[in-house]
Amino acid sequence: MKNDIERVLVDEAVIQKRLDSMAKEIEKDFPEGPVVVIILLKGALVFAADLLRRVPRQLSIECLNVASYHGGLESSGQVDFLDRHFPVVKGMHVLLLDDILDTGRTLAAVAKRLKEEGAIAVHTGVLLAKDKKRAENVQADYVGFEIGDEFVVGYGLDYKGRYRNLPYVGVLKLSAAT
Ligand code: XMP
């Protein structure tokens, strides 16, 4: 698996250190009271698990399956909600977590749906944000790292379902993207 990585972009220790400060920002910003965290599967799973254990607040955790990349290297441009049931968020403060902000379509579509479902406020957090023009006018409230506009894997992010368990974020070798 490591042999498929061209270079490490954000190493394990740097990620863990940044999560400490992100958790503090989140703890400071959220009002006392119940908070629902929505984790976008599967990419945000590793990031969310490490981040949320650092937030000493009462959180309930829900997961949502959405698809936008459909396993390849390019966003399909369409965001599909794959679950039969949408989490109950009416009257709740919501923290929406995704792995990466790319075109912005995913966060925009999910945040819009959460508001339609009655969330009081939706804050968004991503591990990575690509430095590029977004298709949607969307920003994340919490960004772990700004990166260049290149395809990355590891720490939850995949290529065709692989590399999610790498403990760092790296760039895939072209020869591995088959
Ligand atoms: P949008 O374009 O909606 O994209 O902001 C967000 C979703 O696209 C996936 N994505 C990536 N996945 N490496 C990946 O493994 C990448 O470089 C990458 N860029 C976008 C990801 O699923 C994210 O939730």
Image: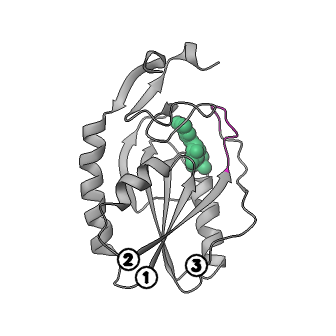
In the picture of the structure, the residue carrying the numbered disc 3 is 89
Question: Magenta part mainly helix, strand or loop?
Answer: loop
Check whether the beta carbons of the residues at disc 2 and disc 1 lie within 8 A of each other.
Answer: yes
Check whether the beta carbons of the residues at disc 2 and disc 3 lie within 8 A of each other.
Answer: no
Report helix, strand or loop for mark 2.
loop
Q: Which residues are magenta?
A: 67-74
* 69 in the magenta segment: yes
Estimate the x, y position of residue 102 in percent, counting from the top left.
54, 45
**Kind of residue at badge 3:** Val
Q: Earlier in the sequence, mark 3 or mark 1?
A: 1
Residue at position x 65%, y 70% in the image: 113
Estimate the x, y position of residue 92 in percent, counting from the top left.
51, 82
Q: Residues within 10 Å of mark 2 (few under 14, many from 20)?
A: few
Q: Quadrant of residue 49?
A: bottom left
Q: How many labels were placed on the picture?
A: 3
In the picture of the structure, the residue carrying the numbered disc 1 is 34
* 136 in the magenta segment: no
Q: Marks 2 and 3, how far apart in space?
A: 15 Å
**Kind of residue at badge 2:** Gln
Q: Quadrant of residue 110?
A: bottom right
Q: Which mark is residue 58?
A: 2
Is residue 90 in view from this perspective?
A: yes
Estimate the x, y position of residue 41 in percent, counting from the top left.
58, 52
**Kind of residue at badge 1:** Pro
Image quadrant of ligand 1 equals top right
Name the side, left or right, on which 33 lies relative to 67: left
